[in-house]
Amino acid sequence: MSISELSSGSARASESGTASYRLVIHGGAGTILKENMTPEKEQAYRAKLEEALKAGQAVLADGGAALDAVTAAIHIMEDSPLFNAGKGAVFTHEGRNEMDASIMDGRDLNAGAVAGVTRIKNPIDLAREVMENSRHVMLAGGGAEEFAVERGMDLVNPDYFRTQRRWDQLQNALKKGELSLDHTEEDFDVIEGVDPEDPDHKFGTVGAVALDVHGNLAAGTSTGGMTNKRYNRIGDSPVIGAGTYADNNSCGVSATGHGEFFIRATVARSICALMEYKGLSLQDAADEIIMKKLVKMGGEGGIIALDHAGNISMTFNTPGMYRGYITGEGKPAVHIYKN
Ligand code: ASP
Protein backbone atom coordinates (compact mmCIF):
# COMPACT_ATOMS: atom_id res chain seq x y z
CA MET A 1 0.00 0.00 0.00
CA SER A 2 1.34 3.40 -0.78
CA ILE A 3 0.19 6.87 0.07
CA SER A 4 1.12 9.40 -2.55
CA GLU A 5 0.69 13.09 -2.47
CA LEU A 6 1.47 15.16 -5.45
CA SER A 7 0.80 18.84 -5.81
CA SER A 8 2.43 21.30 -8.16
CA GLY A 9 6.12 21.35 -7.34
CA SER A 10 5.97 18.98 -4.39
CA ALA A 11 7.69 15.68 -3.86
CA ARG A 12 6.00 12.35 -3.54
CA ALA A 13 5.83 10.65 -0.18
CA SER A 14 5.22 6.98 0.44
CA GLU A 15 4.53 4.91 3.49
CA SER A 16 3.28 1.43 4.14
CA GLY A 17 0.52 0.02 6.26
CA THR A 18 -1.09 -3.32 6.86
CA ALA A 19 -4.60 -2.44 7.97
CA SER A 20 -7.45 -3.56 5.79
CA TYR A 21 -9.66 -0.49 5.72
CA ARG A 22 -8.99 3.06 4.63
CA LEU A 23 -10.67 6.42 4.54
CA VAL A 24 -9.50 9.58 2.78
CA ILE A 25 -11.27 12.95 2.89
CA HIS A 26 -10.96 16.49 1.55
CA GLY A 27 -12.41 19.84 2.57
CA GLY A 28 -11.61 21.72 -0.63
CA ALA A 29 -8.57 22.94 -2.55
CA GLY A 30 -7.42 26.44 -3.52
CA THR A 31 -5.18 29.34 -2.53
CA ILE A 32 -4.64 28.00 0.97
CA LEU A 33 -1.39 29.54 2.22
CA LYS A 34 0.14 29.41 5.67
CA GLU A 35 0.73 33.19 5.62
CA ASN A 36 -3.02 33.81 5.30
CA MET A 37 -3.91 31.46 8.15
CA THR A 38 -4.02 32.19 11.89
CA PRO A 39 -2.93 29.37 14.22
CA GLU A 40 -6.50 29.26 15.62
CA LYS A 41 -8.06 28.91 12.19
CA GLU A 42 -5.58 26.21 11.17
CA GLN A 43 -6.25 24.35 14.40
CA ALA A 44 -10.01 24.53 13.81
CA TYR A 45 -9.65 23.01 10.31
CA ARG A 46 -7.32 20.29 11.54
CA ALA A 47 -9.62 19.37 14.43
CA LYS A 48 -12.68 19.17 12.18
CA LEU A 49 -10.91 17.05 9.56
CA GLU A 50 -9.74 14.70 12.35
CA GLU A 51 -13.26 14.49 13.72
CA ALA A 52 -14.58 13.57 10.27
CA LEU A 53 -11.90 10.89 9.85
CA LYS A 54 -12.66 9.43 13.28
CA ALA A 55 -16.38 9.31 12.52
CA GLY A 56 -15.67 7.27 9.40
CA GLN A 57 -13.08 5.16 11.18
CA ALA A 58 -15.61 4.18 13.85
CA VAL A 59 -17.88 2.79 11.14
CA LEU A 60 -15.11 0.92 9.31
CA ALA A 61 -13.49 -0.51 12.46
CA ASP A 62 -16.81 -2.09 13.32
CA GLY A 63 -16.90 -3.88 9.98
CA GLY A 64 -19.30 -1.26 8.64
CA ALA A 65 -19.84 -0.42 4.98
CA ALA A 66 -17.71 2.02 2.97
CA LEU A 67 -20.92 3.90 2.06
CA ASP A 68 -21.72 4.46 5.75
CA ALA A 69 -18.19 5.67 6.47
CA VAL A 70 -18.35 8.13 3.58
CA THR A 71 -21.69 9.46 4.81
CA ALA A 72 -20.50 9.71 8.43
CA ALA A 73 -17.37 11.67 7.49
CA ILE A 74 -19.24 14.02 5.15
CA HIS A 75 -21.92 14.72 7.80
CA ILE A 76 -19.29 16.18 10.13
CA MET A 77 -18.01 18.52 7.43
CA GLU A 78 -21.49 19.47 6.17
CA ASP A 79 -22.49 20.42 9.72
CA SER A 80 -19.39 22.60 10.19
CA PRO A 81 -19.45 26.24 9.01
CA LEU A 82 -15.77 25.90 8.04
CA PHE A 83 -16.51 24.16 4.76
CA ASN A 84 -18.50 25.04 1.66
CA ALA A 85 -21.11 22.32 2.13
CA GLY A 86 -24.29 22.18 4.21
CA LYS A 87 -24.00 24.87 6.91
CA GLY A 88 -21.51 27.43 5.63
CA ALA A 89 -22.28 26.86 1.94
CA VAL A 90 -21.40 29.77 -0.34
CA PHE A 91 -24.04 32.17 -1.67
CA THR A 92 -25.40 32.44 -5.18
CA HIS A 93 -25.57 35.76 -7.03
CA GLU A 94 -29.11 36.18 -5.71
CA GLY A 95 -28.02 35.53 -2.11
CA ARG A 96 -29.28 31.96 -1.75
CA ASN A 97 -27.51 28.74 -0.74
CA GLU A 98 -27.98 26.09 -3.43
CA MET A 99 -26.31 22.79 -2.68
CA ASP A 100 -25.21 19.79 -4.75
CA ALA A 101 -24.11 16.31 -3.62
CA SER A 102 -23.47 12.83 -4.98
CA ILE A 103 -22.54 9.36 -3.78
CA MET A 104 -21.51 6.15 -5.52
CA ASP A 105 -21.27 2.50 -4.49
CA GLY A 106 -18.25 0.71 -5.98
CA ARG A 107 -19.90 -2.71 -5.60
CA ASP A 108 -22.52 -2.26 -8.29
CA LEU A 109 -21.96 1.23 -9.76
CA ASN A 110 -25.19 2.38 -8.18
CA ALA A 111 -25.17 6.16 -7.75
CA GLY A 112 -27.32 9.03 -6.51
CA ALA A 113 -27.07 12.80 -6.79
CA VAL A 114 -28.97 16.01 -6.02
CA ALA A 115 -28.46 19.47 -7.43
CA GLY A 116 -29.63 22.91 -6.40
CA VAL A 117 -31.31 21.93 -3.14
CA THR A 118 -31.94 24.72 -0.63
CA ARG A 119 -33.67 23.07 2.34
CA ILE A 120 -31.84 19.76 2.92
CA LYS A 121 -29.64 19.88 6.03
CA ASN A 122 -27.34 17.10 4.82
CA PRO A 123 -27.48 16.93 1.03
CA ILE A 124 -25.33 13.76 1.02
CA ASP A 125 -28.24 11.96 2.77
CA LEU A 126 -30.63 12.93 0.00
CA ALA A 127 -28.14 11.80 -2.67
CA ARG A 128 -28.05 8.44 -0.89
CA GLU A 129 -31.85 8.28 -0.77
CA VAL A 130 -31.92 8.88 -4.52
CA MET A 131 -29.40 6.06 -5.01
CA GLU A 132 -31.12 3.57 -2.73
CA ASN A 133 -34.80 4.42 -3.01
CA SER A 134 -35.46 5.80 -6.47
CA ARG A 135 -35.07 4.57 -10.03
CA HIS A 136 -33.04 7.66 -10.87
CA VAL A 137 -29.50 8.91 -10.51
CA MET A 138 -29.94 12.68 -10.26
CA LEU A 139 -32.78 14.87 -8.96
CA ALA A 140 -32.76 18.66 -8.90
CA GLY A 141 -34.31 21.62 -7.07
CA GLY A 142 -37.93 21.49 -5.91
CA GLY A 143 -38.44 17.95 -7.24
CA ALA A 144 -35.52 16.66 -5.20
CA GLU A 145 -37.01 18.30 -2.09
CA GLU A 146 -40.42 16.81 -2.85
CA PHE A 147 -38.75 13.41 -3.02
CA ALA A 148 -37.00 14.12 0.31
CA VAL A 149 -40.35 14.81 1.98
CA GLU A 150 -41.80 11.60 0.50
CA ARG A 151 -38.86 9.74 2.01
CA GLY A 152 -39.64 11.23 5.42
CA MET A 153 -36.73 13.64 5.56
CA ASP A 154 -37.14 16.94 7.41
CA LEU A 155 -36.67 20.18 5.52
CA VAL A 156 -34.83 23.03 7.24
CA ASN A 157 -35.33 26.76 6.89
CA PRO A 158 -32.85 28.07 4.25
CA ASP A 159 -31.53 30.49 6.91
CA TYR A 160 -29.88 27.49 8.59
CA PHE A 161 -27.10 27.55 5.96
CA ARG A 162 -26.31 31.25 6.28
CA THR A 163 -22.96 32.42 7.72
CA GLN A 164 -21.66 35.99 7.81
CA ARG A 165 -18.29 34.95 6.36
CA ARG A 166 -19.89 33.55 3.20
CA TRP A 167 -22.19 36.55 2.93
CA ASP A 168 -19.15 38.87 3.03
CA GLN A 169 -17.45 36.75 0.35
CA LEU A 170 -20.48 37.23 -1.88
CA GLN A 171 -20.41 41.00 -1.33
CA ASN A 172 -16.72 41.03 -2.35
CA ALA A 173 -17.41 38.96 -5.44
CA LEU A 174 -20.36 41.18 -6.39
CA LYS A 175 -18.21 44.29 -6.08
CA LYS A 176 -15.56 42.82 -8.37
CA GLY A 177 -18.22 41.53 -10.75
CA GLU A 178 -19.72 45.00 -11.09
CA LEU A 179 -16.44 46.24 -12.49
CA SER A 180 -16.52 43.90 -15.47
CA LEU A 181 -18.54 44.80 -18.51
CA ASP A 182 -17.46 42.10 -20.94
CA HIS A 183 -17.67 38.40 -20.46
CA THR A 184 -14.09 37.54 -21.23
CA GLU A 185 -12.71 34.43 -19.58
CA GLU A 186 -10.87 36.66 -17.09
CA ASP A 187 -14.03 38.54 -16.17
CA PHE A 188 -15.87 35.27 -15.83
CA ASP A 189 -13.45 34.33 -13.07
CA VAL A 190 -14.10 37.64 -11.32
CA ILE A 191 -17.85 37.31 -11.72
CA GLU A 192 -17.63 33.86 -10.29
CA GLY A 193 -15.54 35.17 -7.42
CA VAL A 194 -12.56 32.96 -8.18
CA ASP A 195 -9.82 35.52 -8.74
CA PRO A 196 -6.75 33.30 -8.16
CA GLU A 197 -4.92 36.13 -6.36
CA ASP A 198 -7.70 36.44 -3.80
CA PRO A 199 -6.98 34.75 -0.44
CA ASP A 200 -10.66 33.78 -0.48
CA HIS A 201 -9.98 31.79 -3.65
CA LYS A 202 -10.83 28.40 -2.23
CA PHE A 203 -13.02 25.55 -3.30
CA GLY A 204 -14.38 24.43 0.07
CA THR A 205 -16.30 21.42 -1.18
CA VAL A 206 -16.06 18.28 0.98
CA GLY A 207 -15.63 14.67 -0.04
CA ALA A 208 -14.75 11.20 1.22
CA VAL A 209 -13.66 7.88 -0.24
CA ALA A 210 -13.62 4.66 1.80
CA LEU A 211 -12.50 1.06 1.40
CA ASP A 212 -14.16 -1.28 3.91
CA VAL A 213 -12.99 -4.63 5.32
CA HIS A 214 -15.21 -6.38 2.78
CA GLY A 215 -13.18 -4.85 -0.05
CA ASN A 216 -15.86 -2.41 -1.17
CA LEU A 217 -15.17 1.13 -2.30
CA ALA A 218 -17.53 4.12 -2.01
CA ALA A 219 -17.13 7.83 -2.75
CA GLY A 220 -19.18 10.93 -2.00
CA THR A 221 -18.97 14.71 -2.50
CA SER A 222 -21.04 17.63 -1.14
CA THR A 223 -20.84 21.35 -1.95
CA GLY A 224 -22.44 24.77 -2.04
CA GLY A 225 -20.82 25.24 -5.46
CA MET A 226 -19.10 28.53 -6.28
CA THR A 227 -19.64 31.98 -4.78
CA ASN A 228 -21.77 34.27 -6.95
CA LYS A 229 -22.97 31.42 -9.18
CA ARG A 230 -26.04 32.31 -11.23
CA TYR A 231 -28.74 30.85 -13.42
CA ASN A 232 -29.00 27.68 -11.29
CA ARG A 233 -25.42 26.86 -12.26
CA ILE A 234 -24.45 23.30 -11.33
CA GLY A 235 -20.81 22.23 -10.99
CA ASP A 236 -19.07 18.88 -11.10
CA SER A 237 -19.81 17.72 -7.55
CA PRO A 238 -23.18 16.09 -8.29
CA VAL A 239 -22.07 14.85 -11.72
CA ILE A 240 -21.20 11.16 -11.55
CA GLY A 241 -17.93 10.67 -13.41
CA ALA A 242 -16.83 14.29 -12.93
CA GLY A 243 -16.92 15.05 -9.17
CA THR A 244 -17.50 11.53 -7.85
CA TYR A 245 -16.87 7.97 -9.01
CA ALA A 246 -16.40 4.55 -7.42
CA ASP A 247 -15.85 1.12 -8.92
CA ASN A 248 -14.50 -1.86 -6.95
CA ASN A 249 -12.56 -2.88 -10.08
CA SER A 250 -10.48 0.26 -10.13
CA CYS A 251 -10.87 3.14 -7.67
CA GLY A 252 -13.01 5.67 -5.83
CA VAL A 253 -12.54 9.42 -6.37
CA SER A 254 -13.96 12.66 -4.95
CA ALA A 255 -12.97 15.97 -6.55
CA THR A 256 -12.82 19.64 -5.64
CA GLY A 257 -12.04 22.56 -7.91
CA HIS A 258 -13.40 24.72 -10.71
CA GLY A 259 -16.33 22.51 -11.67
CA GLU A 260 -16.69 23.52 -15.31
CA PHE A 261 -13.22 22.09 -16.02
CA PHE A 262 -13.85 18.96 -13.96
CA ILE A 263 -17.02 18.26 -15.92
CA ARG A 264 -15.31 18.75 -19.28
CA ALA A 265 -12.40 16.51 -18.27
CA THR A 266 -14.69 13.89 -16.61
CA VAL A 267 -12.06 13.86 -13.89
CA ALA A 268 -13.22 11.15 -11.48
CA ARG A 269 -14.16 8.58 -14.10
CA SER A 270 -11.07 9.29 -16.22
CA ILE A 271 -8.78 8.41 -13.31
CA CYS A 272 -10.59 5.10 -12.72
CA ALA A 273 -10.72 4.39 -16.47
CA LEU A 274 -6.94 4.87 -16.83
CA MET A 275 -6.51 2.22 -14.13
CA GLU A 276 -9.12 -0.12 -15.60
CA TYR A 277 -8.26 0.06 -19.29
CA LYS A 278 -4.63 1.15 -19.35
CA GLY A 279 -3.33 -0.54 -16.20
CA LEU A 280 -1.96 2.70 -14.71
CA SER A 281 -1.33 2.89 -10.97
CA LEU A 282 -3.70 5.12 -9.03
CA GLN A 283 -1.07 7.83 -8.62
CA ASP A 284 -0.02 7.77 -12.28
CA ALA A 285 -3.68 8.03 -13.30
CA ALA A 286 -4.27 10.95 -10.92
CA ASP A 287 -1.14 12.74 -12.17
CA GLU A 288 -2.24 12.30 -15.76
CA ILE A 289 -5.58 13.99 -15.16
CA ILE A 290 -4.87 16.56 -12.41
CA MET A 291 -1.28 17.57 -13.15
CA LYS A 292 -1.32 17.26 -16.94
CA LYS A 293 -4.78 17.30 -18.51
CA LEU A 294 -6.37 19.85 -16.14
CA VAL A 295 -3.29 22.05 -15.97
CA LYS A 296 -3.25 22.22 -19.78
CA MET A 297 -6.93 23.17 -19.76
CA GLY A 298 -6.41 25.79 -17.01
CA GLY A 299 -8.54 23.89 -14.48
CA GLU A 300 -7.60 24.30 -10.83
CA GLY A 301 -8.34 21.82 -8.06
CA GLY A 302 -7.60 18.35 -6.84
CA ILE A 303 -8.85 14.91 -5.88
CA ILE A 304 -8.68 12.35 -3.15
CA ALA A 305 -8.78 8.71 -4.21
CA LEU A 306 -8.40 5.14 -3.03
CA ASP A 307 -7.94 2.05 -5.15
CA HIS A 308 -9.11 -1.51 -4.48
CA ALA A 309 -5.67 -2.42 -3.06
CA GLY A 310 -5.83 0.42 -0.53
CA ASN A 311 -3.44 2.85 -2.23
CA ILE A 312 -4.28 6.45 -1.41
CA SER A 313 -3.80 9.50 -3.61
CA MET A 314 -4.30 13.15 -2.65
CA THR A 315 -3.33 15.10 -5.74
CA PHE A 316 -3.89 18.81 -6.40
CA ASN A 317 -2.59 21.57 -8.65
CA THR A 318 -3.47 24.44 -6.26
CA PRO A 319 -1.31 25.82 -3.41
CA GLY A 320 -3.22 23.76 -0.84
CA MET A 321 -6.01 21.29 -0.17
CA TYR A 322 -7.63 20.44 3.18
CA ARG A 323 -7.18 16.69 3.34
CA GLY A 324 -6.54 13.67 5.52
CA TYR A 325 -6.65 9.90 5.77
CA ILE A 326 -6.71 6.99 8.14
CA THR A 327 -5.42 3.50 7.52
CA GLY A 328 -6.99 0.97 9.83
CA GLU A 329 -6.53 1.63 13.52
CA GLY A 330 -3.89 4.27 12.83
CA LYS A 331 -4.13 7.89 13.94
CA PRO A 332 -5.67 10.36 11.50
CA ALA A 333 -3.14 12.16 9.27
CA VAL A 334 -4.22 15.67 8.30
CA HIS A 335 -2.56 18.09 5.85
CA ILE A 336 -3.41 21.51 4.49
CA TYR A 337 -0.52 22.93 2.46
CA LYS A 338 1.76 21.50 -0.16
CA ASN A 339 4.21 19.15 1.54
N1 ASP B 1 -16.26 21.75 -7.56
C1 ASP B 1 -17.19 22.66 -6.95
C2 ASP B 1 -18.03 23.32 -8.01
O1 ASP B 1 -17.51 23.67 -9.06
C3 ASP B 1 -16.53 23.72 -6.15
C4 ASP B 1 -15.59 23.21 -5.08
O2 ASP B 1 -14.90 22.21 -5.30
O3 ASP B 1 -15.52 23.83 -4.02
O4 ASP B 1 -19.20 23.53 -7.78
Image (spheres, grey):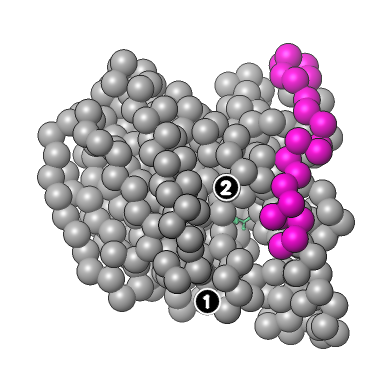
User: Where in the figure is residue 323, as x and y percent of width and height?
Assistant: 40, 50
Mark 2 falls on what kind of element? loop
Q: Magenta span has 76?
A: no
Q: Magenta span has 154?
A: yes
Query: Whereabouts is ligand 1, in terms of quadrant?
Result: bottom right
- Residue tagged by mark 1? 298
Relative to residue 314, is residue 66 depicted above or below?
Answer: above
- Residue tagged by mark 2? 82
Task: State left or right for residue 142 relative to residue 19.
Answer: right
Tell me: is circle 2 under 8 Å from ligand 1. no
User: Where in the figure is residue 51, as x and y percent of width and height?
Assistant: 42, 34
Between 81 and 205, the one nearer to me in the picture: 81
- State the quadrant of the N terminus: top left
Q: Are marks 1 and 2 in contact (CB under 8 Å)?
A: no
Relative to residue 155, is residue 309 depicted above or below?
Answer: below
Say what amino acid the circle numbered 2 marks. Leu
Q: Give the magenta part as a residue range.
A: 149-169
Say what amino acid the circle numbered 1 marks. Gly
